[in-house]
Amino acid sequence: MGSDPRPLKVAIVEDSTLLREGLVRLLAEAGFETVAALGDATTLEPTIASAAPDVVVLDVRLPPTHRDEGVRAAIALRSSHPEVAVLLLSQYVETTYARELLAAGSGGIGYLLKDRVTDLEQLRRAIEQVAAGGTVLDPKMVEEMLRARADPLSRLTPRETQVLRGMAEGRSNAAIAEALVVSPGAVEKHVTSIFGKLGLEESSAAHRRVLAVLQFLGA
């Protein structure tokens, strides 16, 4: 009998003691192993070296200024340790920070509102998705980014736009198919059409998926 796969290792960077401790409990309940729980990003680099987390969950606003320290740390982490996935948490919809994070890497990144962390299943899916190299964006973030776009992607049909919206939210083709009540094969055809209309040449499907999302969000 084979042994169970090891749980994903997660490091938390959150200055609120209450939320940090709550995240540790939630992650344990979700089946993850918390290997570090930090109050700021100053010791994140040596923590990565010693604890080797699979995913780092960071607050967008960290000490000392509580502005964009979490975003800066996330971008630096994606550069120095591209094998480590990043999930940013924010109290508010801050599209500029989301765009910066998306532009800094080709996958393994996510951005959720803190309201979502109370939904254990959603938090679990988000962490597993970024750990697998995917991209996860809070639905409210997607809506705000779309609202800010001056020029929508007019070449896409309404159904293709729905499919691309689902991709931007980090959904798999199967999940998109379920949400739209269509077959997975139909979603695959829409995705192929989207790639063609956006001028994304043949490469890995995962890479083109990220590029399509970035173009969709205007990053």
Image (spheres, helix red, strand yellow):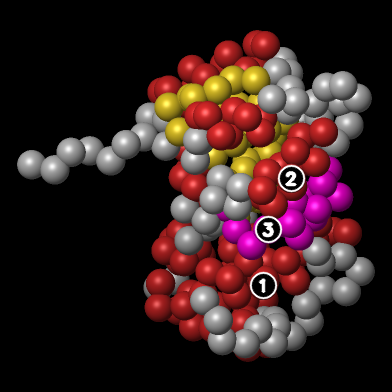
Which residue is more in the foreground, 138 or 45?
45
Q: Residue 207: horizontal and vertical position, in percent?
A: 58, 71
* SS assignment at label 2: helix
Dot label at residue 54: none
Q: CA distance from mark 2 to mark 3?
A: 10 Å
**Residue visible at 49% across and 47% down in the picture:** 131
Amino acid type of disc 2? Ala
Residue, far top: 18
In this rendering, position of residue 132 left or right of residue 3: right
Q: Which numbered mark, 1 or 3, is in the foreground of this view? A: 3
Residue 100 inside the magenta-drawn segment = yes
Q: Residue 97: horizontal and vertical position, in percent?
A: 82, 46
The residue that mark 1 highlights is 212
The residue that mark 2 highlights is 76
Amino acid type of disc 3? Gly
**Residue visible at 49% across and 25% down in the picture:** 35
| Magenta highlight range | 93-108
* SS assignment at label 3: loop
**Residue visible at 60% across and 75% down in the picture:** 208
Which quarter of the image is occupied by the N terminus? top left
Q: CA distance from mark 1 to mark 3?
A: 14 Å
In this rendering, position of residue 173 left or right of residue 154: left
Circles 1, 3 touching at the beta carbon (< 8 Å): no
- Residue 98 appears anywhere in the view: yes
Amino acid type of disc 1? Ala
Q: CA distance from mark 1 to mark 2?
A: 24 Å
Mark 2 nearby-residue class (10 Å; few <14, some 14–19, many ≥20): some
- Residue 113 appears anywhere in the view: no
Decide which of tag 1 and tag 2 comes sooner along the chain: 2
Which residue is more in the foreground, 81 or 171?
81
Circles 1, 2 touching at the beta carbon (< 8 Å): no
The residue that mark 3 highlights is 105
